């Protein structure tokens, strides 16, 4: 068959049947030999690509018909969830709204940031304050503990600056050991990848990967089209992180090539918080659309959705239990709900008792998995176990 006959035969077939079989019967050298101006072969290839995309979508849709609850039930009876966990400690000391908290790697210390202009480092077991750091700007929105040695903490907010503090070398008039300046908008979240590097997200729609010692920007990630509200580091691979944005998407990034490798859609409003599943293969999101969702990187899609008609407030923060069975969500209506990730999504496992007296602005589970901390605009933090 000549080249002209191949083209005419391909164009004669209905476009609905245009699939990979077109290309299987063409020698590769005949395709590459087609002159650039021959638009007929381009049309055929475009039809083939469109058909392949449709086939992929059909296969993905067929695999998503089952619910997480049905799949889990098919594996046998599930262990009953112990509920409810109880409030064990209340951490009092801030005089302004608590906006952020983060556990240290030792699972006992944590740092909190408040609009009273202070960072407080707590011993969550004894409720003692081990350190209080006055900030140059009181409009703080995020804080983070370095996990390996626990010597560094970071914070930032409406000053557009990520300030790094060494808590082992603190004086009464503590000053930041390093200030990272490059963002053109507020700092919404920061997380250490190791003792020498940190990732920040900002209202300028970007995330930045920093060298802490030099203060230099190593990479800038700018695929989001709206404010980036949260980032989380993959617990199994610190070269990978996820971000959530007001553009309603969550994106997976790879530090090695500096690119977005996956974009996950599904939320109908701003994504305020992201958290990795313990095995690093999935992540959770919390949104102003009143739902939490679970996305799997391997299937490149949403695998569960948590919410019901009775819950109408937005989610500010999410976290997983150590096993991943439970997903915690902090809500604008002062509540903290606990969802069973292996159950159908319409019913919450339970809500924590003794709720806060104002918006739950942050929460986190420690590395050991034996304690949950929630922070609130009521100026207090509560430790649950």
Image (tube, grey):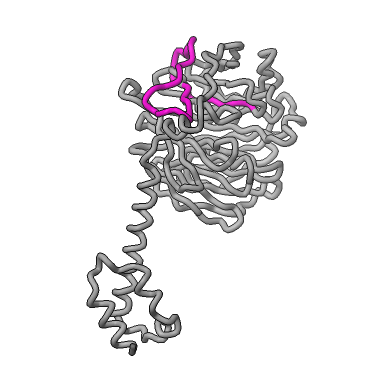
Vertical side of 24 occupied by 210: above or below: above
Picture quadrant of residue 257: bottom right
Can residue 131 be seen from the camera position used here?
yes
Q: Quadrant of the N terminus?
A: bottom left
**Image quarter of the C terminus:** top right
**Residue 31 image position (x, y, % from top left):** 40, 81
Q: Which residues are magenta?
A: 338-366
Whole-percent x and y of residue 273?
Answer: 47, 34
Q: Residue at x 57, y 38 (%)?
A: 190
Locate residue 41, reporting x and y percent. 32, 79
Give the side of residue 239 with respect to residue 42, left or right.
Answer: right
| Side of 382 where 289 appears, left or right | left
Q: Main secondary structure of the magenta part?
A: loop
* Total count of labels: 0
Q: Is residue 353 magenta?
A: yes
Q: Is residue 362 visible?
A: no
Of residues 212 and 81, the one drawn nearer to the viewer in this rendering: 81
Q: Nearer the viewer, residue 120 or 313?
A: 313
Residue 323 is situated, as x and y percent measured from the top left of the image, at: 59, 29
Q: Residue at x 44, y 28 (%)?
A: 343
Tell me the residue at 45%/12% (across/down). 357
- The answer to whether residue 200 is magenta is no
């Amino acid at each position: 068959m000549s080249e002209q006959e191949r083209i005419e035969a391909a164009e004669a077939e209905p476009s609905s049947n245009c699939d990979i079989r077109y290309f299987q019967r063409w020698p590769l050298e005949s395709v590459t030999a087609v002159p650039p101006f021959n638009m007929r072969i381009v049309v055929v290839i475009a039809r083939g690509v469109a058909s392949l995309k449709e086939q992929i979508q059909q296969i993905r849709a067929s695999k998503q018909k089952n619910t997480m609850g049905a799949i889990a039930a098919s594996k046998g009876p599930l262990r009953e969830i112990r509920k409810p966990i109880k409030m064990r400690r209340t951490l009092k000391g801030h005089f302004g709204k608590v906006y952020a908290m983060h556990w240290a790697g030792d699972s006992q210390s944590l740092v909190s940031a408040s609009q009273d202009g202070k960072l407080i480092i707590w011993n969550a077991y004894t409720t003692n304050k081990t350190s209080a750091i006055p900030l140059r700007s009181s409009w703080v929105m995020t804080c983070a503990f370095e996990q390996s040695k626990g010597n560094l903490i970071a914070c930032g907010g409406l000053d557009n600056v990520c300030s790094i503090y060494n808590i082992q070398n603190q004086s009464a008039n503590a000053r930041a050991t390093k200030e990272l300046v490059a963002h053109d908008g507020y700092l919404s979240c920061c997380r250490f990848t190791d003792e020498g590097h940190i990732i920040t997200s900002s209202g300028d729609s970007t995330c930045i990967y920093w060298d802490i010692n030099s203060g230099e920007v190593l990479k800038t990630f700018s695929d989001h089209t709206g404010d980036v509200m949260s980032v989380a580091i993959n617990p199994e691979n610190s070269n990978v992180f996820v971000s959530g944005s007001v553009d309603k998407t969550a994106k997976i990034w790879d530090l090695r090539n500096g690119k977005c490798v996956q974009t996950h859609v599904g939320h109908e409003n701003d994504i305020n918080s992201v958290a990795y599943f313990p095995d690093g293969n999935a992540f959770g999101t919390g949104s102003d659309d009143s739902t939490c969702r679970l996305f799997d990187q391997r299937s490149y899609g949403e695998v569960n959705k948590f919410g019901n008609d009775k819950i109408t407030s937005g989610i500010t923060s999410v976290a997983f239990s150590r096993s991943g069975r439970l997903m915690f969500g902090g809500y604008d209506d002062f509540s903290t709900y606990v969802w069973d990730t292996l159950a159908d999504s319409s019913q919450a496992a339970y809500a924590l008792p003794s709720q806060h007296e104002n918006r739950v602005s942050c929460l986190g589970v420690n590395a050991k998995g034996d304690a949950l901390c929630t922070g609130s605009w009521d100026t207090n933090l509560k430790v649950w176990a």
